[in-house]
Amino acid sequence: MSNPLVELMVGELPASFVVALQQALPNIYQEAYQQAFSQPLWEKSEGRYLVGHLRHALFEAQFRNAAREAGLKTGLTRVPIGSYEYSYVRAGKLFLTASALPSEDDIVRPAFFRQQHALVNHFLSNPTLPIIDPPDLTSVDTIYGIVIHVPYAEDKAQCSYAGIAIPNEGTTEWVEQLSLADLSKAQAQATQAKPETTEDRAHPRKKDEGQRKKEGSGNE
Amino acid sequence: MIGTPGFVGARLTEGREARALPASVLAELVGVSHAAILQYESGKTSPRPEVMALLADRLNLPQAFFKRPLDSLDESEDGIVWRSLTSATKAARRRCWRRLTWVQNIVRYLRESLDLPEPKLPDFGIGNPALLTMKDIEVFASLTRETWGLGVGPIADLTLLLENNGVIVSRLRLTADGLDAFARWSERDGAPYIILGADKNSAVRSRYDAAHEFGHLVLHRKTAGLDHKRLEAQAFRFASALLLPEQSFVKELWAPSLDAFRSLKDRWRVSIGAMIKRCEQLEILGSEQTQRMWINYNRRGWRQVEPLDEVLPIERPRLLGRCFEMLVRDGIRSKAQILVDLPYAARDLEEIARLPKGYFIDEGPEVRLKDSGTARPAGSVVPFPGGRPKN
C-alpha cells in the first residue's frame, strides 16, 4: 500500500542530496572522532565531550552544502533565545533540520525550535489509523522532517544509521521514518525506465477462400 | 544404366551442403566414387534407385526432395552479411545459406494459406551505409524504438518484438565457429529473415545476436562493395544502442564496475561483456579502464560463462510453429500433406519451426540400451563368427 509521506520524501528530495549525505556521513564521523581524540592538549573525557560537537559542526556544514549543490533553499536560523544557530533545508513541502541521536529508536531531545516547527505537522495527529485513512498531503504547505544520524554504540567513529524522520506535532514520536539507503533505493526505482513489455501479436491469420484462390494456391 | 527419373542434380548439392558434407565424405557414406557424386550433381548422370535411396537416407532427406524442380525464387548467398568471413569456413556458410533458403521456402508455402504479420521495419532511406557515423546509428536505434512505440526501458522479449513486426525468426543449430547468427532482407519475398544459432546456451548473447542481425536489416539493405568490418561495427553499435539506450541505461548505472553490470544484467537482459563495450562506446570507460575491466572479467571466468547465463530463459521464436499448428488445427493441411508439400525431413521442419520433436511423425518413445552387467564396454570388438565374409 502506498504511503503518502514516503512518496512525498521520494518525490521532494533530490536524489543527489540524499546521496551526498550518505557519502559524507562516514567521513564526518571519522573526522570528528579523529579530531576529538588525537589532540595532545586534552584527554579522553574532553574528547568524549567534544566529539558530538565536532560531528554536529561538520554535519551542519555538509547539510547546507549538499542542499546548495542540489539546488535547494538552505540557511541558518538563530534560536529565539539567541544562543544557538541551526541549519534548515527547504525541499518542496519538506522543511528539514538535522539531529544526531543515540539510537534510531530514540526521539529528538525536546527543543523549543523543533517544537515550533513540528506544529505544522498537526494534521498527522489524526486519531484514525494512517493506513485506513492516510493523511491528505495535497492541501498541506509544509511538513517538518528531521534528518537523523546515529553512531554505533560500540564505535562512535562510525555512523550506524541515517534517515529522515517525520515527528508528530509535539515531537514526542515519529510518525514516519525512512533510512537514506531506502530512500535512495526508492528514488532509483521511481526513475527507472519501465520494462517494454511486448504484446504477443506474432499470430498468423487464415486467408479466406477467395483470397487464397486469387493468389493461386495450388495445394488443394 | 537405369537412373532415377526426375532427379535434379542441383538438389543433391543443396542437400549435401545443407548437411555440410563434402562430396568425398558423402561418396564414402553411400559407397560410390567421388566422381560419381560430382556427376550426379552436375546432372550428367542420375543415381541408380538403390543409390538414390542411400543418398536420401544418408542426407536424411525424403527422395522427393531430390526430384523437386529448381525454384526460381531461390536467392544466392549475396546480401547476407556474415559475422566473420575468416573464422567461419566456406562450407559452414554454405550450410547456413542452404538452411535459410529452406526457411524461405517454408514461409512461401505458409503464405499460400496464411497471412503472417506484415514487415514493419523502419526505413531510414540509407543510400550508402559507408557514410553513416556512429552518432547516426545511435539516432536510428532510438528512432526504431520510437517507431515501434517503445520507451527507453529494457525490451522484455526482443524475438517476439521482431516477430510482431514481421521479421521471420528461426533458431537453428549452425554448428559453425564464429557464425552465431545471420540475416537477409529478401527482396523477392518482401520479408526480413533472421536465423539465430541455437548452439549458444546464453539468453543474453542470443538476444544480442538478434539485435545485431536486426541492425543489418535496418542499416544494410544495400551492402554491395562495402567494407565488411565497417558493416559489422555498425550492426554492433546498433544492437548496443537498441538494447541499452544511453539516457536510461546510464541513469541506472550507479558505477561502471563489474558488480554494477552484474546487478543490471537481469533487468536489461544484456551480457556483462556487452555492457562493458557499451560503456566504452559512451566514453564512460576510457581505454585503460576498459582494458582493466576485461582483465578482471576474464579473471572471474566470465569469458566462458557469465553469472545468470544458465538462469535467464532463452527467447524462442513462435510464429512459424504457430503457422503449422494452425494449418493442422483448422484442417487446411494435414501433417502428412505438409510432409508431401514440403520435401524436407520432418525433423528439419520441426527444428525450423521450433515444434516439438515428433510433431510430424511420432517415432514413439526413444529406445535406450539397458545398462546391464552383460553389456560390453564401449569400443570392445565383437568377434565375427566364421571369419570375415568374402565380397
Image: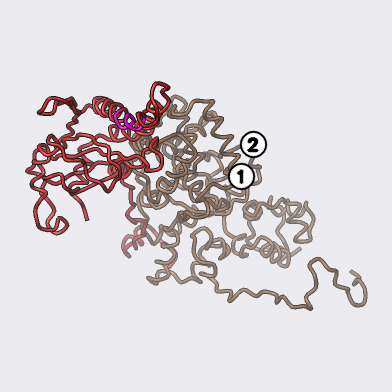
Chain colours: A red, B brown
Task: Evaluate whether label 1 is on the same chain as label 2.
Answer: yes
Left of A59 or right of it: where is B314? right
Q: Looking at the picture, tell me which residue is in the foreground, B300 or A146.
A: A146
Q: Amino acid at mark 1?
A: Arg
Q: Chain of mark 1?
A: B
Label for residue B27?
Answer: none
Left of A124 or right of it: where is B353? right
Badge 1: how crowded within 10 Å, few (<14), some, or many (20+)? many
SS at circle 2 = loop
Q: Looking at the picture, tell me which residue is in the foreground, A220 or A131.
A: A131
Label tally:
2
SS at circle 1 = helix
Relative vertical location of residue B87 with respect to residue B338 in this rendering, above or below: above
Instruction: Give the CA separation, mark 1 to mark 2.
Output: 11 Å
The reply to whether residue B108 is visible in this rendering is yes
Q: Position of residue B264 (x, y in %)?
A: 42, 44
Query: Disc 1 vs disc 2: which is toward the camera?
Result: 2
Q: From which residue to which does the magenta span run?
A: A47-53
Relative vertical location of residue A30 with respect to residue B77 in this rendering, above or below: above
Relative vertical location of residue B271 with respect to residue B230 in this rendering, above or below: below
Q: What residue is at 45 percent from the left and 34 percent from the top?
A: B256
Left of B25 or right of it: where is A76? left
For label 2, the residue is B86
The reply to whether residue B186 is visible in this rendering is no
- Toward which corner of the image does residue A77 lie, by quadrant? top left
For label 1, the residue is B93
Q: Position of residue A155 (x, y in %)?
A: 41, 39
- Toward which corner of the image does residue B185 lie, by quadrant? top left
